[in-house]
Amino acid sequence: MTHTSIRPHTLRIEPTRGWVALRLGEVVAYRELLYFLVWRDLKVRYKQTILGVAWAVLQPLLTMLVFALFFGRLARVPSDGVPYPLFAYTALVPWTFFATGLTLASNSLVGSANLITKVYFPRLTIPLATVLAGLVDFALAFPVLFGLMWWNGVAPTAQVVWLPVFIALAFATALGVGLWLSALNVEFRDVRHVVPFLTQLWMFATPIAYPSSLLPEKWRTLYALNPMVGVVEGFRWALLGTATRPGPMIVVSGAAAVALLIGGAFFFRRMERTFADVV
Amino acid sequence: MSSDVGFPADPSLAPTLHDAPRVIRVSRLGKQYQLGARARYRTLREALVESAMGIARSVGRGRTRRAVERFWALDDVSFDVAQGDVVGIIGRNGSGKSTLLKILSRIVEPTRGTVDLEGRVGSLLEVGTGFHPDLTGRENVFLSGAILGMRRTEIDKKFDEIVEFAEVERFIDTQVKHYSSGMYMRLAFSVAAHLEPDILVVDEVLAVGDAAFQKKCLGKMGTVARHGRTVLFVSHNMGAVVSLCSRSLLLQSGHLVLDSDPITVAARYQATLTAAPTSTTDLAGAEHYGSGKARFVSLRFVPERRDGTTREMMCPGSRLRVETRIVCSAPVDSANVGITVYDASGYRLVDANTAMQGRFVSMKPGDEARVDFALDDVRLKPGTYLVGLWMGRSNVEDIDGILYAATLEVEPDPQQLQHSEQFPGSYLCAFKHSVVISTQAGDVASPGVRDEPGQRSAAGASR
C-alpha cells in the first residue's frame, strides 16, 4: 500500500464547516450543463400551452391595462408627464422579469430534488439557470414596449445606452433574492407560502403604479435600498427620459443588489452541504 | 480480469492489480444522520420555537432538550481502490452502501474522514437522472448526458451509438412520456452506459428492464470493467457481483466488515442474513385509519421451513406466519380481519382474510385478540414487500387499517445463490424444465437440469 501514492491533482472530499468559498470557477466549468438547464426550462415552460410564448408578453400587458384603468384613469395617479399606460408598462417589464425569476428560482432547488440527490454538479447552476431562462421572456416583452413608445410618440433618449446596466441590476437582484429563498426553501417549506405574499408587498414598495417623485426627497435614498426602485426608475429614465434624477437612488440600489447577490451566494454555499440530506 | 491469479489470503491486499496506482483512498469516513427529533424538513415556526427554547435554556429556565437520536450511517470506513479495480459493495438495506456511494459521488458531505479521488468521477445512482417526460428522446439524451457530466461534443459523437444500443431509433423524436417503461429504461441506461469517466460509481442500475436487456447491461458493465476503468458497484444481485467484480466490500450497520474476493464476501453476506432476528413491529406509532373500535397493536413475522420449524429469514418457498394482536375498545361485531402483501411499488400481491374462510371476529371492550395467518409456500421473489392490515366489514365500515404496517424482506435462498441470477418480477413459480436439442444424430434430452455448465464457465470467464 505504501509503494503508490495519490498524485497531487486529486479531489479531496472532506467535511466543511461554516462559510466556504464560492468556487465560481466550477460553475464556469459546468457552463454546458448550465446551457442545457436553461434550454430545458425554456423548452418545457410553454409546452402544452395554447398561447405559448405569448404569455411572456400578456402578463405585463394585462397588468398594465388594469393599472391604467384603476390607477391612471380613475385614481389619477401622476406619471411624471408620461402617458400612464407607457409609464406603468416600462416598469412592469423589468418587474415581471424580477417577480417571475424570484418565484421560479425559489422553487428551483426543491423542484430539482431528483437531480440533487442523484448526481453532483455545482448547485448554484440551478437557480442561475432559472433566472437566465427568464431573460428570454424579458427580451420578448421589449418589442411591445418599443411599440407602445412609438404609439405614444416617445423616442428613446441617448440615456438608453445605460439600459444594460439596469438589466444587469434587475438580474442581480432577482438572482440574489432567488439564492436566499431557494436555499431557505430546501429547509423551510414556509418559503413557498411567503413568496407570493412577498412579491405582492414588494410590488407596492416599488414605484410601478406610481412615480417615486411622490415621496419626499429625503426619503428617496432610503427607499432605494429596495434595488427594484433603482431598476424601475432607471428604466424610465433611460427609455422615457423622465425628469426624476435617479443618480443617487441607482447607486444605493446597485449597492443593495450587490450585497443581496454576494450575501445570497455565500448563504447558498453555506446551506448547500445539507441540500441532498434534507431536500 | 485475473482469474489465473489466486485470491490472496490477506484481505487487505486488493485481489487484483497490486501495482496499479490508487485512485480512490477512503480514510476513516463517517456520516451521521439525525433521527426522529427532526422531520425531513422543518418549518420556520419549529426553527423559531427551537431557537427560542435555546435562549430560554441558556438563561437557565428552559426544559432540557429532547434527546436527538443520532446514528452513524457510515462509521470509520477506510479502504483503497486501485486503478482498474471493479469493486462490488454489498450489504443489507441500511448498511451504508448508498451513503458511501453518495459521498463518493459528492452528493452528500461526510461528517468526518476524507476521500481522495483521482480522475473524473461519474455516478449512476438512478436510471434516467435528469430525464424530462415532456422532452423527446433526442433532447433527453443531450440533457441527461450533460447532467451526468458528458461534454456536448462527446454526446454528439456517441449519439448514434446510444440510440442504437437502446433500440429506440424510430421513436427518438417522440416525447419520452409516450415511451413504454422498457423503452424509457433502455434509453436512460444507454446514455449512462456511454459515460466514460475514470471512476464509475454505480448503484443497482442493472435491476431494470427485461431479462434480455439486463443481460446486455451486464455485458456492457463487463466491457467497461475490462477497459481498465475503475468501477464501484452496489448491488443486491450476488450473481452480478460475483461475475463482474474483482473485489468486494461487505458493509454492516455502517461498518466495513470484510474486504475480500467476491465469493468470500458473498458467502459471508449470506451468513449475516441468517442472523437477522424475527421481527415484531409495534403499531402504536403507525398511521391508522378507520373507526378505531379495535386497534392492531403489533405485528410479527415468523418465517418457517416446510417442516414447521422456525427459520431466521424469509426465502422464496418458505412458510410465513403473520401474527397480529388486536385490542378492543368498543364492541365489534362480526368483523373480517385481513392482511395484504404489496410489492415495493404498491401493487397488491397477496390477500388473506378470515372472511375468505368463513370466519368473523366479534370482540367486547377490553378484549384482546390474536389473529394469525399461516401463509404456505410463499413464492415471492427476493426483495422488499410491504404488509398492510385491515379489520372491518366490507362496504360497511373500516374498524382499523394500516396501509403499510411493516416491511417484509424476502432474501435469496442461500442454497440456490450460485444459480440465482435475479430476474425482475414478483412471483417465483415452482417449476421443472427439460431441454431437447434436435441434432442430425438424433434427439438429446436432458430433463430436469438445474444448471447449465456452459453458463457457469461463461460467467467464470467474464471475470
Image (cartoon, coloured by chain):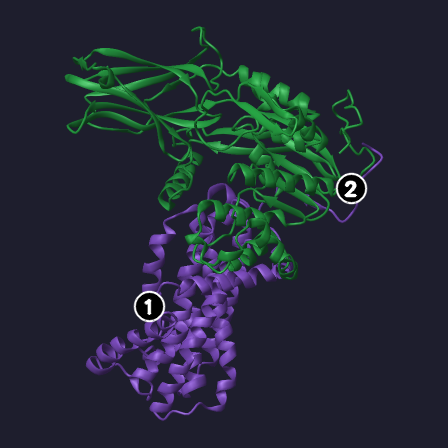
Chain colours: A purple, B green
Inspect this view and state whether residue A143 appears.
Answer: yes
Kind of residue at disc 2: Ile
Task: Say whether disc 1 or disc 2 marks the residue closer to the N-terminus.
Answer: 2
Q: Horizontally, is B4 left or right of B331 in the view?
A: right
Q: Residue B112 placed where, x, y %? A: 62, 35
Q: Position of residue B249 (x, y in %)?
A: 66, 28
Q: Which residue is mark 2?
A: A6
Mark 2 crowd level (few <14, some 14–19, many ≥20, 10 Å Cα)? some
Say whether marks 1 and 2 touch (CB < 8 Å): no
Q: Say which residue label 1 marks.
A: A50
Regarding mark 1 in the picture, which secondary structure is present there?
loop
- Residue at 38% over, 46% down: B44
Q: Nearer the viewer, residue B362 or B108?
A: B362
> Quick one: quadrant of the N terminus of chain A?
top right
Three-letter amino acid code of the residue under disc 1 = Ile
Name above or below for residue A118 compared with residue B233: below
Element marked by disc 2? loop
